[in-house]
Image (spheres, rainbow, N blue to C red):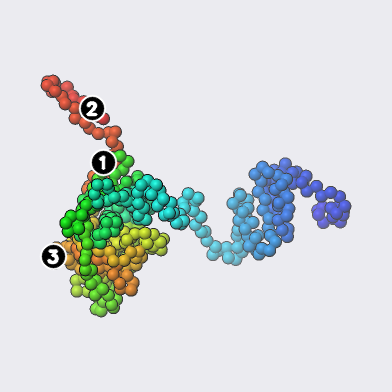
Amino acid sequence: GLLTTADYWVDHVRRPVRFADGVRAARAAGATVFLEVGPDGTLTGMAQQTLDSGETFVPTARKDREGARTVLEALGRLHTTGVSVDWAAYFGTAAATARHVDLPTYAFQRRNFWLVDVADAASDAVSLGLRATGHPLLGAATALAGGDAVVLTGRVSVATHPWLADHAVNGVVIVPGTTFVDLAVRAGDEVGCDVLEELTLEAPLALPGQASAQLQVTVGAADGDGRRQVGIYSRVEDLPWTRHASGELGSAGAVPAVEAVAGVWPPVGAEPVAVDGLYEELAGLGLAYGPVFRGLVAAWRLAGEVFAEVALPEDAAADAARFGLHPALFDAALHAIALGDLVPAPEPGKPYLPFAWSGVRLHAAGATRLRVRIASATAGSGATSLTLLDAGGLPVASVDMLAVRQVSAGQLEVSRTAGHRNKLFQVDWVPAGAVVRDPFVPVLFDVA
């Protein structure tokens, strides 16, 4: 055609090019996608200045960019705008081995990686007459007037603490018992008590949907021996408070010599125990653990004791420094109990959960990996003792006694609904007075 004649190119040099007119004419003829074949993207930019009604302009070459990759990017863009591309021709002999890959995630399926601005949280607490704690769940603390009692407050939800969604019992997301231990230990730090002498878990804290629960940890005045009562409460909106745990804080005095178990690891003579499939077995019992809580790495048995290694995943380890001991890491240490004969086998649907803690001491904060030793606290009791060490064998935490108990789905459901019911729908008894009613006439109860 025309492009191969000399007259065309003579006119091209001697007369106006009328580039804009040509682009508009192409658009009027129905063209919506313009592909530039040339050494750069100059014409693409000029065409975009000429038309501005949703057309697509794609250059096949860019200055200082690798040619084959630029052409491939151009083909990909044409494909996404609906232009038919002969991919078999592009791949050639490799077409038979080409495979589809997953699409990128949508914009709303994202994760946040920025740091929490602790400084702003601290200034907010101070402006409200409180003291910032720096704890991920307990944002502020205050000493009550007229005594030496202390209250720590905060909020918790799956939206603000998404790692909690990885801990579900019989289909209900609940706050792990190790979290209550961490809250009580942090409250003890606030008043100079370094031992959680006792903590009994009374009711689970369920987190349905995106509901946010207020937290309060109360620490009473010290008695003659320096012990203080501690209680952990929550409520949703302005519903009544529920007490989830209560216990006693004290001071250790001399620290037990937990360093004695450090040394050769694993202990000489310990037999490896397979951990593959453990979390699937626990899920069958009703304990569904997500990635953050699946921290059991290896385990061994020796003379009735269980030894294990647990670790936090990398994305959770960044937050460990703000806890005394990250609840997910602490909870993973308890999973090794299932690998020994320390407690009776649980019934399906009635998994064991922590119930009562005694003699809990935190020796070092911010651990992301632990060595764990679990032994019977008292022969035949089903209670265990735990020693937690870091990778170098130095003490991180110790528990003199942990008692567990089975929890059914019904108990969790009652707990979940009791704390989150709609207060507008409650049955109220109205005095009937001395009126005698016909027994065949139904009585309507007032509903507030």
Alpha-carbon neighbours of circle 2 within 10 Å: few (<14), some, or many (≥20)? few
Where residue 71 appears, as percent x and y from the top left, is 65, 60
Type of residue at label 1? Pro
Query: Depth check: 26 or 226 in front?
Result: 226
**Residue 240 circle label:** 1
* Residues at marks 3 and 2, CA–CA distance in whole angstroms: 54 Å
Q: Earlier in the sequence, mark 3 or mark 2?
A: 3
Q: How many marks?
A: 3
| Mark 1 neighbour density, 10 Å: few (under 14) some (14–19) many (20 or more) | few
Tell me if residue 390 comes above or below residue 77 in the rendering: below
Q: Nearer the viewer, mark 2 or mark 1?
A: 1
Name which residue lies at 72% across and 41% down: 28
Quadrant housing residue 135: bottom left
Q: Earlier in the sequence, mark 3 or mark 1?
A: 1
Label 3: element kind: loop
Identified by mark 2, the residue type is Asp
Q: Residue furthest front?
A: 146
Disc marking residue 380: 3
Quadrant position of the C terminus in the picture: top left
Residue 196 in the image: state x and y as whole percent: 23, 59
Q: Which residue is mark 2?
A: 446
Specify the label residue 425 is tagged with.
none
Closer to the chain start, of discs 2 and 1, is: 1
